[in-house]
Image (spheres, coloured by chain):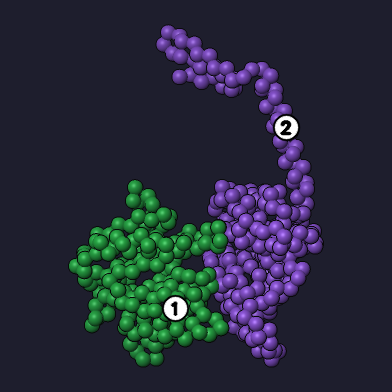
Chain colours: A purple, B green
Amino acid sequence: MALQDLCNFKDIFLDSIPTFSLPIGLPLSSSHSVPLPFPMSHGTTTLAFIFQGGVLAAADTRSSCSGLVACPAAQKILPIHSHLVGTTSGTSADCALWKRILARELRLYQLRHGRRLSTGGAAKLLSHMLQPFKGTELCVAATLCERSGPSLYYVCSDGTRLKGTLFSVGSGSPYAYSVLDQGVQWGLTVQEAVSIAREAVFRATYRDAYSGNCVDLYHITSKGWTRRNREDLKEEYYREKERQRQKREEGETLHDISCVHVCVSVHADSIYVWSTVQDVTML
Amino acid sequence: MEYLIGIQGPDFVLVAADNVAASSIIQMKHDYDKMFKLSEKILLLCVGEAGDTVQFAEYIQKNVQLYKMRNGYELSPAAAANFTRKNLADYLRSRTPYHVNLLLAGYDEADGPGLYYMDYLSALAKAPFAAHGYGAFLTLSILDRYYRPEMHRGGERFILNLPSFNVRLIDREGIHDLEKLTLASFL
């Protein structure tokens, strides 16, 4: 392994015990007193998807620690180089470390070979580096946009490496998936994609206790990544409340007139159907 | 649950694998290919624990290709199967065993078609038909009942609850992709 070889470091823990004993205070959502319904640790919501305008990555900013919010303003999307961004999920320390190691290895490759390693190559490198550490709770989704086209890989410490167009990782991912699956298509504009990503993270943070606070959005194109300002989801929550209130008011005014009245009047050669909907339908 | 099936005919081997890559309850990919091409006429189908499948299958794949580069000719399916089994057995009693179930299918000029079943305890068996996964419980009995060695192509039907499958056929000419089977094609 690169780091070990460089430092001549002998990991005595790996040799002596078969699995890693997790230190206390990890940002895992599995608190011992309340068992999870299914094995979904990683208290976070991160997502990334590809569309015609490049790749969009979004994540919440809550760093949780077995029921305590350790940091409400964490950074879960770490840029690796100008065209590669990685989302993190799992143990914050592990993720930050491995992203730095990956950044170093990619820079070395670039210096040695004169060109950047592709996303697939970067993802493969990461998954090979993680392979001896199968016990750790690290789970990343690496995203990259290149001149040849955007690509997105999901890499996990259990060895999974998948190429795809839409991924979401973390305890809030089922909620995010449901919003993304219905909204994401290739032809979205940047604005639409941003609003879908924001909506997905918002919905996940609404339902998932271990995701919350703010949302980070990164947009990657062939020119590199750009970061939007961090947005507090509390604002989104209030906007949503406002929208619902307005809808309720509109619904009430309609109700005041009448319930849905359908009158059918038969004329000589045609039937008219009247209803409280604006238009009159002629059958 | 992941599923693999292989059927050997008189001059071909038909293999199919499901397309799902799942992580606990979430389907991460619907079009995941579980077949690894070892050579022009050998396919390795691999299911099991998440990272182990790809790591082990790619290791075998690269070694088989290396053999060809060093010696100028390809490994036969029987040799490739035994090589795979040996590697699996060697890792079995190490600190990092590979938890993978495999089907190796190939066509040899001299021996004809061959299908090899291997499980994570590195048991190897050459069989006329084989399957892995929960679906195996259902399909093996069907195959037991209806399999005939002189079966011709196009005589198989599967009834399973997985959304789509990759199907490939290996014969004298090499590996052919058949159409991807989805639930819709059975209705």
Chain under numbered label 1:
B
Q: Nearer the viewer, residue B113 or A36?
A: A36
In the image, residue B82 above or below residue A56: below
Amino acid type indicated by mark 1: Leu
Q: What residue is shown at x 40% (from left), y 71% (from top)? A: B45
Could you tell whether B152 is left or right of B139 in the image? left
Respond whether the residues carrying marks 2 and 1 are from the same subunit.
no
Q: Answer with the quarter of the image where residue A245 lies.
A: top right
Please report contact status of discs 2 and 1: CB closer than 8 Å, yes or no: no
**CA–CA distance between discs 2 and 1?**
64 Å
Q: Write the residue at 46% across / 14% down.
A: A271
Chain of the residue displaying label 2:
A
Q: Which residue position holds label 1?
A: B121
Evaluate whether residue B65 shows in this view: no
In-front residue for pair A215/A91:
A91
Instruction: Residue A2: give x, y in percent of width and height.
Output: 64, 85
Q: Nearer the viewer, mark 2 or mark 1?
A: 1
Q: Quadrant of residue A67?
A: bottom right
A259 over A160 or under it: above or below: above
